[in-house]
Image (cartoon, rainbow, N blue to C red):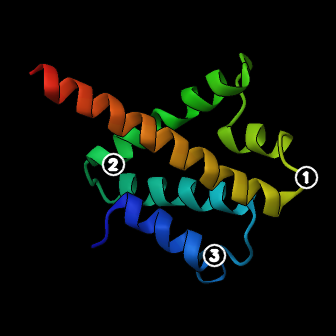
Amino acid sequence: MAGFNDLLNKIRQKPGMYIGSPAVSGLHLFLCGYGFARQEQGLAITVEEEVFEQFQPWVQERFGVRASVSWAKIVLLHAVDERGGFELFYELWDEFMAQQQAIDGQQKSVA
């Protein structure tokens, strides 16, 4: 089974196969369903999924949002439309992952 990051990359490449059209709301709903299905199956959370859980607070911090609003709504507020939100999600995801990798690299060099 492919990992969570692989799944995100597959959706990025062919959104129509997974969510119909490239829309941030569709992506959000798909990922909620993915998490629900894994939970219902009793599958343990993976390291990649743990990292994704940090995306919500990161997006809130990035845009200065203190209200309890999903990352998808925040992204959509900063996009022209659903497609733009989909594209913005992946720009933010790439930025977030680059920061995570930098943090991991710093932690490994200290250890």
Please, what is the three-letter code of the amino acid marked with disc 3? Pro
Q: Quadrant of the C terminus?
A: top left
N-terminal of the two: label 3 or label 1? 3
User: Is the Cβ of the residue at disc 1 closer than 8 Å to that at disc 2?
Assistant: no
Please, what is the three-letter code of the amino acid marked with disc 2? Glu
In this picture, is 94 found above or below 67?
A: below
Q: Which labelled disc corresponds to residue 48?
A: 2
Q: How many marks?
A: 3
Q: Which quadrant would residue 58 be assigned to in this image?
A: top right
Element class at badge 2: helix
Instruction: Judge from the rendering whether residue 31 lies leftward or rightward of residue 74; answer left or right.
Output: left
Residue 2 image point, x, y percent: 31, 70
Residue underneath mark 1: 80
Residue underneath mark 3: 15
In this picture, is 35 found above or below 15?
A: above
- Which residue is pictured at 38% across the width and 59% down the height? 4
Element class at badge 1: loop
In this picture, is 53 found above or below 63?
A: below
Mark 1 vs mark 2: give the one in front: 1
Identify which residue, 106 or 46, lies in the foreground: 106
Give the CA separation, mark 1 to mark 2.
Answer: 29 Å
Q: Which quadrant would residue 99 be assigned to in this image?
A: top left
Give the CA separation, mark 3 to mark 1.
Answer: 19 Å
Mark 3 vs mark 1: give the one in front: 1
Residue 9 image point, x, y percent: 48, 67
Neighbourhood count class around disc 2 (C-alpha, 10 Å): few under 14, some 14–19, many 20 upward: few
- Which residue is pictured at 85% across the width and 40% down the height? 77
Element class at badge 3: helix
Please, what is the three-letter code of the amino acid marked with disc 1? Val
Residue 23 image point, x, y percent: 75, 64
